[in-house]
Amino acid sequence: MEGEFVRTAADGFVVTWHDGSSNVVSRTAAPELGLLNDGERFSAMARFGDENKVVALESVSILPSIPDAKEMWETWPVRRS
């Protein structure tokens, strides 16, 4: 799964998943998330339990940021021939 680390909360870490849903992941399920900065994107293998709660995150990897579409368009190379 891919997600974005939103912030640290009292009961864990707030994450927004690639499908737009958000939930709080407990510190015991994913202590690695404590190393991320707010707004960083990550990829991980997620195991979900009852009520769609994350039971464990494994193999957490930081993903590069998504470029702004306008900036990408303005800097896109143009063929000059």
Image: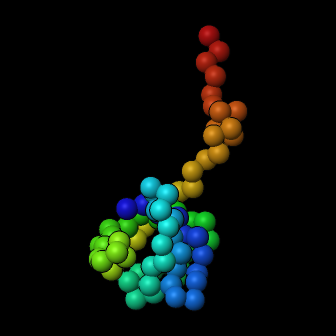
Seen in the picture, residue 34 relative to 2 is either above or below; the reply is below
Q: Where is the C terminus found, in terms of image quarters?
A: top right
Q: Looking at the image, which residue is at 57% across and 66% down?
A: 40
The foreground one among 80 and 40 is 40
Q: Is residue 40 visible?
A: yes
Residue 36: % across, % down = 55, 75
Q: Looking at the image, which residue is at 31% across and 73% down?
A: 48
Seen in the picture, residue 55 relative to 42 is either above or below; the reply is below
Q: Looking at the image, which residue is at 38% across and 83% down?
A: 29
Name which quarter of the figure residue 45 lies in.
bottom left
Residue 60: % across, % down = 40, 71
Q: Where is the N terminus found, in terms of image quarters?
A: bottom left
The foreground one among 50 and 16 is 50
Residue 13: % across, % down = 52, 79
Q: Looking at the image, which residue is at 65% across and 15% down?
A: 80
The single residue placed furthest to the top in the displayed view is 81
Q: Is residue 31 visible?
A: no
Name which quarter of the figure residue 74 lies in.
top right
The single residue placed furthest to the front in the displayed view is 51
Direction from residue 80 to residue 28 in the image, left or right: left
The foreground one among 35 and 4 is 4
